[in-house]
Image (cartoon, rainbow, N blue to C red):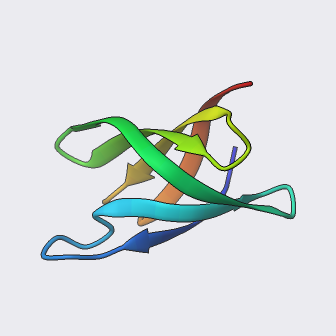
Amino acid sequence: MDVSVQSYAGYRAEERPRSFTLNGHAYEVHEILDRWFGPDHCYFKVRADDGSTYLLKYDTAADVWTLEVMVK
């Protein structure tokens, strides 16, 4: 599922998500629970301001964010 993600870009581009928009609703990332990196992607398990947990994937080669999983 495509999602629009606003991220903090430090010394590495798209380092971590700060907020995202899904189905027209904006969510603030309150906590990054976990993160892991592959050769061409990054995963971020985050808790948003609605209390739900989301797994966001950033494809570094394509410069595209997707929502992989949402747990209410």
Which residue is nearer to you in this view: 26 or 5? 26
Quarter of the N terminus within the rendering: top right
What residue occupies the far left of the structure in this picture? Answer: 11
Left or right of 67? Residue 60 is left
Q: State the image quarter where residue 68 is shown.
A: top right
Left or right of 41? Residue 63 is right
Q: State the image quarter where residue 13 is shown.
A: bottom left
What residue occupies the far right of the structure in this picture? Answer: 24
Q: Is residue 4 visible?
A: no
Percent coordinates x, y for residue 22 in the rendering: 76, 55
Percent coordinates x, y for residue 5 in the rendering: 56, 65
Percent coordinates x, y for residue 62 in the rendering: 41, 62
Which residue is nearer to you in this view: 29 or 5? 29
Q: Is residue 28 visible?
A: yes
Image vertical order of residue 31 relative to residue 25, above or below: above
For the point 25% across and 48% down, the residue is: 40
For the point 52% across and 56% down, the residue is: 65
Which residue is nearer to you in this view: 24 or 61? 24
Quarter of the C terminus within the rendering: top right
For the point 44% across and 60% down, the residue is: 17
Image vertical order of residue 41 relative to residue 62, above or below: above
For the point 12% across and 76% down, the residue is: 11
